Image (cartoon, grey):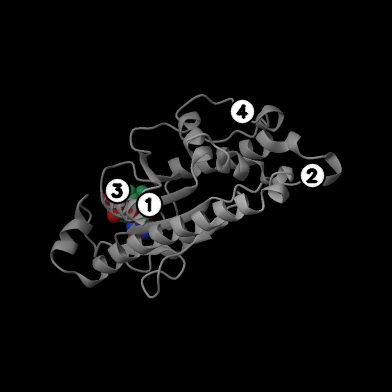
Amino acid sequence: MIKVLGISGSPRKGNSQFLLDIALESAKMVSDEVEIESYSIRGKKFGGCVMCQNCQKDGECIIRDDFQEIRDKWIDADVIIYSIPVYHMGMPAQLKAFIDRLGNSMFGRYKDNFKPEEATLPRSLKTIATITQGTHVFSGQEHTITQMINHALIMGCIPVTGDMWESYIGVGGWTNTREDRNALEQLVAEGDRDALVAVRGSRSIAKRAVEISMLLREGARYKETYFGSNPVYVPLMDRVNRKE
Ligand SMILES: Cc1cc2nc3c(=O)[nH]c(=O)nc-3n(C[C@H](O)[C@H](O)[C@H](O)COP(=O)(O)O)c2cc1C
């Protein structure tokens, strides 16, 4: 199974969820072997990292809130699709708090796999796709996608994009100054060109994220003696060898 985790980074059920649903539906269409799960930060609590460094000892975050649940889902997924509203030209604070804590605790979690003289970071090799949208145009979409590409790289993952011309580095939509939860849905119904571009991009980015994940998994299986013996690839091989 290729496990696809969709994460809505919006605290409301709105435009991010609309594009995420479209993306997840497209991911599912790629193959019978795709399993999708939709997660939303709505109603969840994520405290900010306090740099206590406890996670560097045992990989666990001392703050007990909704972090642990989504972290476990994140670790288990082969593909992550983030659908995020632009806040202040970046991602919402709740999502940033999750990502800060995820990054540091993952480094602590896998550190004992490596010999001290070879200290390095785990390669999770998930594919990570980003969809974002805001009220305005040129108002932070690309910055937000770039933050997520940086997140993907730091996590040893593969940032992916969709098909040209809708998606250069990820999907960036806008609601044509409308603030309602269903603004994009309405715009699609009205045939708004930009909203349709965001929909097409959401479909293609999800499809490509799954396809690349399939290639990674089959490649790791084909070269199992190499990747299976290298501790850097433990997070990938744990998923490749997962009991279905
Ligand atoms: C605190 C806050 C900051 C925002 N900052 C931006 C911004 O910088 N650029 C933008 O285009 N929209 C901004 N918006 C608008 C949202 O991105 C927009 O309404 C989006 O469609 C909300 O997505 P949702 O329906 O998934 O919650 C902001 C909204 C809030 C609440």
Pick whichever of labels 1 and 3 is earlier in the sequence. Answer: 3
The residue at which mark 1 appears reads as 83
The residue at which mark 4 appears reads as 60
Q: Is residue 142 left or right of residue 100?
A: left
Ligand 1 is found in which quarter of the picture?
bottom left
Q: Amino acid at mark 3?
A: Gln
Pick whichever of labels 4 and 2 is earlier in the sequence. Answer: 4
* Dots 1, 3 in contact, CB < 8 A: yes
Task: Look at the numbered disc 1 and give the secondary structure of its residue.
Answer: strand
Rendering coords of residue 11 (x, y %): 33, 41
Residue at point 38%, 69% (across, down) = 138
Q: Residues within 10 Å of mark 3 (few under 14, many from 20)?
A: many
Q: Amino acid at mark 1?
A: Ser
Q: Amino acid at mark 2?
A: Ala
The residue carrying mark 1 has its beta carbon less than 8 Å from ligand 1:
yes
Q: Quadrant of the N terminus?
A: top left
Residue at point 29%, 60% (across, down) = 135
Q: Residues within 10 Å of mark 1 (few under 14, many from 20)?
A: many
Q: Residues within 10 Å of mark 2 (few under 14, many from 20)?
A: few
Rendering coords of residue 2 (x, y %): 45, 46
Q: Residue 73, relative to residue 187: is it above or below?
A: above
Rendering coords of residue 189 (x, y %): 14, 62
Label 1 and label 4: CA atoms lie apart by 26 Å
Farthest right residue in view: 117
Label 4 and label 2: CA atoms lie apart by 19 Å
Pick whichever of labels 3 and 4 is earlier in the sequence. Answer: 3
Pick whichever of labels 1 and 4 is earlier in the sequence. Answer: 4
The residue at which mark 3 appears reads as 17
Pick whichever of labels 2 and 1 is earlier in the sequence. Answer: 1
Q: Residue 55, relative to residue 197: is it above or below?
A: above
Label 2 and label 3: CA atoms lie apart by 39 Å
